Amino acid sequence: MGDAGFEGVGGADEGVGGNEGAEGSAAVARRRPRTRLGLVLGVVWVVVPLVLFLLDRPILLSGNPALVIALAACGLVGVVLLVNETPDDRRRHRRRSRWARVLGQVVGVLATVTVLGVLVWLRPFAATPSAVAALEGGADVRVTDAPAQITIAPKGSTPTRGLVFQPGARVDPRAYVPMLSQVSKQGVLVVIVKQPFDIGLLATTAPQSLVDEHPEVVAWAVGGHSLGGVAAARFALDHRRLVRGLVLWASYPDQSLAGRTDLQVASVSGTRDAFTTPADVAASRAMLPRTTAYTRVEGAVHSFFGDYGSQPGDGSPTVSRAQAQRQVVDATVRLMLSL
């Protein structure tokens, strides 16, 4: 009978212990975060750069390395976030105050959206297959593709005139090789800048080093498409003795060059351009020398100034790409031969 009593008490103790265990498990479950945000963000920081690299691999590997480095850095951030999501680390996070956790989560999400959003926006407009093929050169020109620039030189002569050209924002530099090869055939050395992140304003001083590489050239012009033209105009403003000519393709300066009476300028624009509109070009006249030669290409749009296909938000052309580009090339050659 005594043994039975003790067994009853033991059974009761076990029941109480079981209840305490259940309550403890419930409390732990309540404390456990429903979503491991750090783990999710880590995956995003790894996957997004990897996908962007795989989608644009040929363009990225042929252009300025800045974007590839940025993608790799973001992937490394993702790896660090994933490694830090260990059980000990999660317990340490739970010991923080509620407001500290919320603030950290908000900052993490905002940083992720901002940085990775910018990288997605920076995806370049790819050169067409025919433009890429033009890197092989031809009977009249020799094309050299280097990490910082693409050089196009006429065969059979040593050019004394040179043009440093800066691409439009987010445009594959190779997209300009076909048109500028036509310019080079006329005895002009052409150097296309490979800009960091394909943004001209990040390479406003780039022409200087490229000019220094070609002492045989005695007359230099700078030029560019769209934002690249803005960067070229800034260089022309700051290098009065070096630059004799400025070529603006669907572009205009953001600082006045009106006082440069010694600067030859060619402004070439499309009448159907939805980005550099005819109104924009007209408004910029006051910032350019009075001797500026203006060429309006009837029916041309913004993307006709390179070979990278159509551009979202651009106008609708009423002329063929070949006809428009012929006029752009002719205007550029006239400027170069006038130096």
Image (spheres, rainbow, N blue to C red):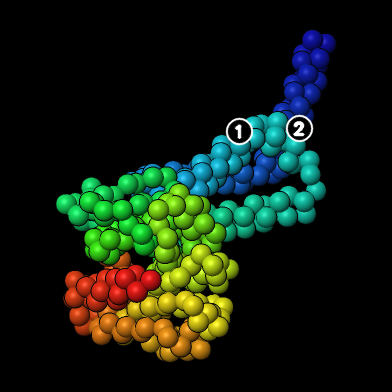
In the foreground, 11 or 138: 138
- On the image, the x and y values in percent for residue 65 come to 47, 46
Look at the numbered disc 1 and give the secondary structure of its residue: helix
State the residue at coordinates (25%, 74%): 330
Residue 304 can be seen, yes or no: no
Which mark is nearer the camera, 1 or 2?
A: 1
The numbered disc on residue 83 is 1
Q: Earlier in the sequence, mark 1 or mark 2?
A: 2
Total labels drawn:
2
As displayed, is residue 59 above or below residue 318?
above
In the foreground, 119 or 164: 164
Q: Is label 1 in contact with label 2 (beta carbons under 8 Å)?
A: no
In the foreground, 15 or 294: 294
As shown in the figure, which amino acid type bears the numbered disc 2?
A: Glu
Quadrant where the image shows the N terminus: top right
In the foreground, 337 or 225: 337
Asked which quadrant contains residue 265, the reply is bottom left
- On the image, the x and y values in percent for residue 183 come to 27, 64
State the residue at coordinates (48%, 67%): 243
- On the image, the x and y values in percent for residue 207 come to 48, 58
As displayed, is residue 319 above or below residue 84?
below
State the residue at coordinates (55%, 42%): 73
Q: Residues within 10 Å of mark 2 (few under 14, many from 20)?
A: few
Look at the numbered disc 2 and give the secondary structure of its residue: helix
State the residue at coordinates (71%, 51%): 104
Q: Residues within 10 Å of mark 1 (few under 14, many from 20)?
A: few
Asked which quadrant contains residue 5, the reply is top right
As shown in the figure, which amino acid type bears the numbered disc 1?
A: Val
Residue 107 can be seen, yes or no: yes
- On the image, the x and y values in percent for residue 78 come to 56, 41
Q: Which residue is mark 2?
A: 20
